[in-house]
Amino acid sequence: MKDNILITGGAGYIGSKLSYDLTDEGFNVVVVDNLSTGSKKLINPKVKFIKANILDEKKIFSVIKKYKTKTIFHLAASLDVNESMIDPIKYYLNNVVGTESLIKDASKANLINKVIFSSTCAVYGDVEKKFVNETQECSPVSHYGKSKFLSEILLKNYSKKYNFSVAILRYFNVIGADKSLRSGIINESNQLVKKLNRNAIKKDYEIDIYGNDYNTKDGTCIRDYIDVNDLSNIHIDVMKNLKKNQRVILNCGYKNGYSVNDIVDNFEKCINHKIKRNIKKRRLGDIESIVSNNIKLTKFIRKQYRGDLINSLINSIKWEKKIKKGSKLK
Ligand SMILES: NC(=O)c1ccc[n+]([C@@H]2O[C@H](COP(=O)([O-])OP(=O)(O)OC[C@H]3O[C@@H](n4cnc5c(N)ncnc54)[C@H](O)[C@@H]3O)[C@@H](O)[C@H]2O)c1
């Protein structure tokens, strides 16, 4: 019999997409979200939604107990790298203490089989290697990255002590929208593609670029951009392949790096309009270049996702048009 599933952060960008894919497959899904950055508009009507904070231990324990959600996808977090440098405590509280609060009582009561945790490539910090693999020593630069790394350690230790399995998914940069346009980014995210869309829809064909003096091919930062549809499928593949009491860390990216300028160039092609690039100072906490080695993931799920940048950008534009109906974006 299929476990019932809890998604924390299921009213957010990635969690809502995952909830749709899970209910499409017939799973019973419960979503816990405090709507701090999430939105009611993203909540899948087929899930049981509970507005709650993961820091509320008692409430969370009662939800896990009542709905018997033995599998947990833990996505709820604060995730703005730059904000984490200004307000670190917010990040340690929400991300690290929040993770412990979520699993503490339920693991002791033997109510958890699997936790699939949303981590980030920000745990690696500045890396020398062209492609980073999971054995790379972690040396996070931002407080966001540090808070996720501490959460990983906490989960590993709890899972060993209380015998449940854990998959730590280190996402690279997530882009795009649900291919059926049921979910996408809705909040004031600082994500590059979101900002390009938000500006273009206002016919404001400009973008701020933070630093063009990095040691990269064109001076701008390089990232590995993964489509949210693939990332969501990866979660489900990982859940299905994760064995009892197994612990695994997996990079989620395509082993393909794009600079900020590459993304802007491709976005220009999609909207058929030039974008003015305003070069600003480097931001605190930003890493020069980070691209995944994804061999471990491919072996684990016995599948390879390759992505298609233009397709992801087009989906994100369609989504932006959907949420800002009546706009003049081409
Ligand atoms: N978006 C990316 O590129 C990216 C990259 C790496 C990792 N991640 C990770 O993926 C996860 C989801 O990110 P997202 O892009 O969907 O962000 P999001 O802000 O859209 O979603 C986060 C959700 O968590 C909820 N939440 C936050 N704190 C909570 C709390 N204390 N209690 C209950 N709910 C809470 C928010 O309301 C929101 O709905 C995060 O853990 C993030 O660190 C995202």
Image (cartoon, rainbow, N blue to C red):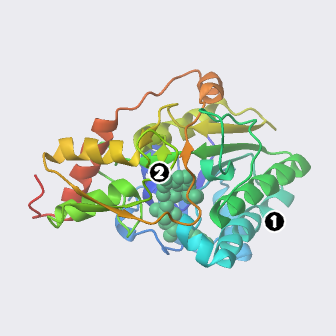
In percent of the image, x 59 and y 21: which residue is there? 302
Left or right, residue 198 beside residue 235: left
Q: Is the residue indicated by label 2 positioned so its CB lies within 8 Å of ligand 1?
A: no
Q: At 48% from the left edge and 37% from the top edge, which residue is drawn?
A: 233
Q: Which residue is mark 1?
A: 105
Per the image, the residue denoted by label 2 is: 19
* Helix, strand or loop at mark 1: helix
| 49 relative to 159 in the view: left or right | left
In the picture as drawn, the residue positioned furthest to the right comes out as 161
Residue 240's x, y, as percent? 62, 33
**329 sits left or right of 243 in the view:** left
How many circles with numbers are drawn on the protein?
A: 2
Which of 160/221 is in front? 221
**Label located before the other in sequence (2 or 1):** 2
Residue 203, image x and y in percent? 14, 64
Neighbours of disc 1 within 10 Å: few (<14), some (14-19), many (20+)? some
The answer to whether 286 is drawn above or below residue 235 in the figure is below
Q: Residues within 10 Å of mark 2 (few under 14, many from 20)?
A: many
| Disc number placed over residue 73 in the picture, else none | none
Distance of mark 2 from mark 1, alpha carbons?
24 Å
Q: Quadrant of the N terminus?
A: top right
- Is residue 25 in view? no
Along the line of sight, the residue nearer the viewer: 286 or 312: 286
Task: Name which residue type carries label 1.
Answer: Asp
Q: Secondary structure at mark 2?
A: helix
At x 34%, y 53%, the residue is 193
Instruction: Inspect the image, locate mark 2, and give the three-letter code of the amino acid beneath it.
Output: Ser
Please state the horizontal and vertical placement of residue 235, each as a whole percent of the image.
56, 40
